[in-house]
């Protein structure tokens, strides 16, 4: 049975989103009967709505959606559900309970972990600036809520400033510089992702505050300039692992399409990556990446063997029936 899956991605910028797609494609390499159609909304909710509706018009059997902002993308997802097209939400949520399954990290738990790690790192006392992701995206509100609620247990910690960074390194810099000039006694920054943590470090360096300020980020991605590397280099004190979940999302999608039992809420676990475990994380990830490359090489080999077999069969038939 052949299936068509539509994937509405809020943005394809940055290695984290690319890792999500790569995970989906890796899973699909075992299922040649599935066709994946991918759209990129370039961080624009209007465009994402239109693209979801286009995918529905073209005809897909299932939709995977990672919404840029919750509310504006909700009507298109609800339309899909009304038309009987199952929807798997990945990483971010819509503003409605009408979806088939969710796959992603628990953003609230990520915020709570950041709060308890900050308490340990600062020895129960300190002033904090929080750098938020795009307002209106569920990852932002959940990470913020988890962090705020988590901090209630630690009266010695105080959030003295908030900066909105839109998940990107560049946009937060002027606002963070202003906030740090107003609060030069800040001792920790919680950035909602590692990219913004990287940007925050540069601002701290420029202001001569890099030694005094600890930075916690989120994502813990593999690769140069990403979370694991940033912790190794001491740019970030810690990064909270937040898996892109591409493979998991695709596996859930395939279960739904095949009418197999599936879980509606699939929360991917997180851990703190810091100086105590970063080497192990790096080695483990190196191993996984090299195993993935082996699988890809084997698949390539299998394909060329199939092609050779097919052409030899043709020659054989030619010889037998000439
Ligand atoms: C990538 C990203 C990640 C973050 C996630 C939140 O677009 O900003 O860095 O963890 O989205 O939804």
Image (spheres, rainbow, N blue to C red):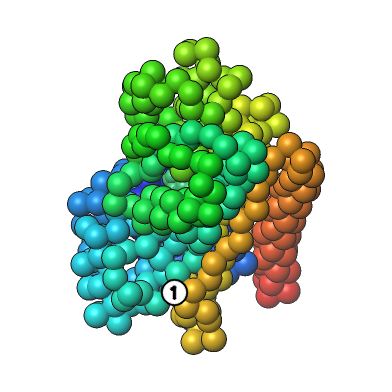
Q: Is residue 221 visible?
A: no
Give the left or right position of residue 61, taking residue 196 as reference.
left
Above or below residue 76? Residue 152 is above
Above or below residue 213? Residue 68 is below
Above or below residue 144? Residue 122 is above
Q: Is residue 187 visible?
A: yes
Give the left or right position of residue 62, taking residue 295 as reference.
left
Residue at 58% from the left image edge and 30% from the top image edge: 214
Q: Which x, y percent locates residue 218?
A: 54, 44
Q: Which x, y percent locates residue 186?
A: 48, 27
The residue at label 1 has a CB less than 8 Å from ligand 1 = no
The number of numbered badges drawn on the structure is 1
Residue at 22% from the left image edge and 73% from the top image edge: 79
Q: Which class describes the residues within 10 Å of circle 1: few (<14), some (14-19), or many (20+)?
A: many
Above or below residue 60? Residue 257 is below
Q: Quadrant of the C terminus?
A: bottom right
Secondary element under disc 1, as helix, strand or loop, is strand
53 and 181: which is toward the camera: 181
223 and 217: which is toward the camera: 217
Furthest residue in direction front, as rendered: 155
Residue where numbered disc 1 is placed: 101
Q: Which x, y percent locates residue 11?
A: 37, 46
Residue at 73% from the left image edge and 74% from the top image edge: 320
Residue at 34% from the left image edge and 71% from the top image edge: 60
Q: Which x, y percent locates residue 300?
A: 68, 54
14 and 242: which is toward the camera: 242
239 and 5: which is toward the camera: 239
């Amino acid at each position: 049975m052949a299936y068509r899956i539509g994937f509405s991605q809020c943005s394809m910028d940055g290695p984290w989103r690319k890792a999500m797609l790569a995970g989906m494609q890796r899973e699909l390499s075992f299922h040649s009967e599935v066709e994946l159609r991918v759209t990129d909304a370039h961080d624009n909710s209007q465009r994402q709505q239109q693209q979801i509706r286009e995918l529905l018009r073209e005809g897909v059997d299932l939709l995977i959606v990672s919404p840029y902002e919750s509310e504006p993308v909700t009507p298109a997802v609800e339309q899909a559900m009304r038309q009987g097209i199952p929807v798997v939400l990945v990483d971010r949520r819509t503003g409605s309970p009408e979806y088939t399954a969710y796959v992603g990290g628990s953003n609230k738990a990520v915020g709570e972990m950041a709060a308890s790690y900050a308490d340990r790192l600062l020895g129960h006392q300190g002033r904090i600036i929080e750098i938020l992701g795009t307002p209106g995206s569920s990852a932002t509100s959940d990470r913020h809520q988890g962090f705020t609620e988590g901090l209630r247990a630690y009266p010695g910690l105080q959030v003295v400033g908030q900066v909105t960074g839109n998940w990107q390194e560049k946009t937060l810099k002027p606002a963070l510089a202003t906030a740090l000039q107003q609060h030069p006694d800040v001792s920790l920054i919680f950035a909602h992702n590692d990219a913004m943590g990287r940007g925050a470090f540069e601002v701290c360096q420029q202001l001569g505050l890099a030694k005094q300020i600890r930075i916690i980020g989120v994502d813990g991605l593999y690769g140069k300039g990403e979370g694991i590397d940033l912790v190794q280099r001491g740019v970030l004190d810690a990064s909270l692992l937040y898996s892109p979940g591409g493979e998991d999302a695709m596996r859930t999608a395939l279960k739904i399409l095949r009418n197999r039992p599936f879980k509606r809420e699939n929360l991917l676990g997180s851990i703190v990556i810091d100086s105590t475990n970063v080497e192990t994380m790096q080695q483990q990830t190196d191993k996984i990446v090299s195993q993935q490359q082996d699988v890809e090489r084997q698949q390539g080999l299998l394909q060329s063997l199939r092609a050779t077999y097919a052409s030899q069969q043709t020659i054989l038939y030619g010889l037998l029936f000439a």
